[in-house]
Amino acid sequence: MNDKYKWFLIAPAIIIILALGFFIHRLVAGGDNSANADQQQNQAVQAQIDNTQQQADGYQDLVTRNPQDTQSLKGLADAYVAIGDLQTEAGKANDASVSYKKAVDTYRQSLAVKDDPDLRIDLAWAYYEMSMYDVAVRELQTSTTQAPANQRAWLTLGYVYANIDQLSKAKDCWTKAQNINPNSAVGQEAKKFLDQSASGSLTPPTRQP
């Protein structure tokens, strides 16, 4: 066969091979970039976990010195919740469950020293994160009984109800929260939930520091 005709036959194949090589290179490079981005994200989350754990260790030292220190107990429990949230974000469900359980135990230790409706809301939220919805509802009901004018208790109780398919009860709670003070941040959030309930799409309630 004439060499010129051979090149006519071979050239398209060479072009296709080169194009495939370029495509595969870009695909692999893209995969590497994605993996690097995921790794960097995981490292950033782990750094936050480590930093929050240091805060928890500091609070633990204070609690060890004075087990009646409710402020340090709350700080320790809040730190455990924050760690649990970060572990959830990192896909570490089992570790998160352990952290939320530590938060529950610490909140209960503080409540044993001094009952506090706001702290009971935080306890209920930790139970919620553990998917213990019935217990969360019970704690929030106790909080609303202790402090009927506590907007955050009604707001959070409504959110838990909504997420266990009891929307009617949820709306009642949000209406109560809004009526207590429509102009407050919590009152505005309650209104937002009432509006969102029509679409069935709810954002989590803002946590009080």
Image: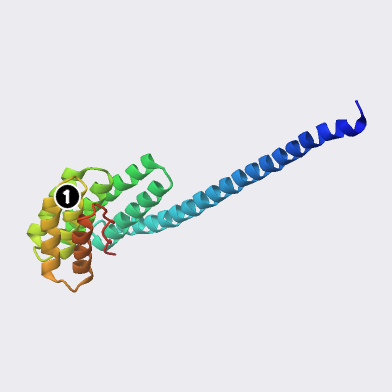
Q: Position of residue 41 (x, y in %)?
A: 51, 52
Residue at 27% across, 53% down: 201
Mark 1 Cα within 10 Å, few/some/many (few <14, many 20+)? many
Count of numbered marks: 1
Q: Is residue 130 above or below residue 196?
A: above
Q: Residue furthest top?
A: 1
Query: Image quarter for residue 69?
Result: bottom left
Residue 103 vs residue 29: left or right? left
Q: Pick the residue in front: 69 or 19.
A: 19
Q: Secondary structure at mark 1?
A: helix
The image position of residue 194, as x and y in percent, is: 18, 60
Q: Residue drawn at (41%, 56%), measured in percent from left and top?
A: 52
Instruction: Answer with left or right where residue 156 lies relative to residue 80.
Output: left
Q: Position of residue 94 (x, y in %)?
A: 37, 39
Q: Please indicate, yes or no, whether residue 116 appears anywhere in the rendered image.
A: no
**Residue under the point 11% across and 68% down:** 179
Could you tell me residue 102's position as x and y percent?
Answer: 30, 47
Between 162 and 105, the one lying in front of the other is 162
Q: Is residue 135 left or right of residue 100?
A: left
Q: Is residue 15 visible?
A: yes
Q: Quadrant of the N terminus?
A: top right
Of the 4 image quadrants, the one containing the C terminus is bottom left
Name the residue: 8% across, 63% down.
148
Residue at label 1?
Answer: 161
State the image quarter where residue 59 is shown.
Answer: bottom left
Front one among 105 and 35: 35
Query: Residue lying furthest bottom in this view?
Result: 183
Amino acid type, mark 1: Tyr
What colour scheme governs how the chains and residues are painted in the rendered image of this protein? rainbow
Q: Is residue 98 above or below residue 86?
A: above
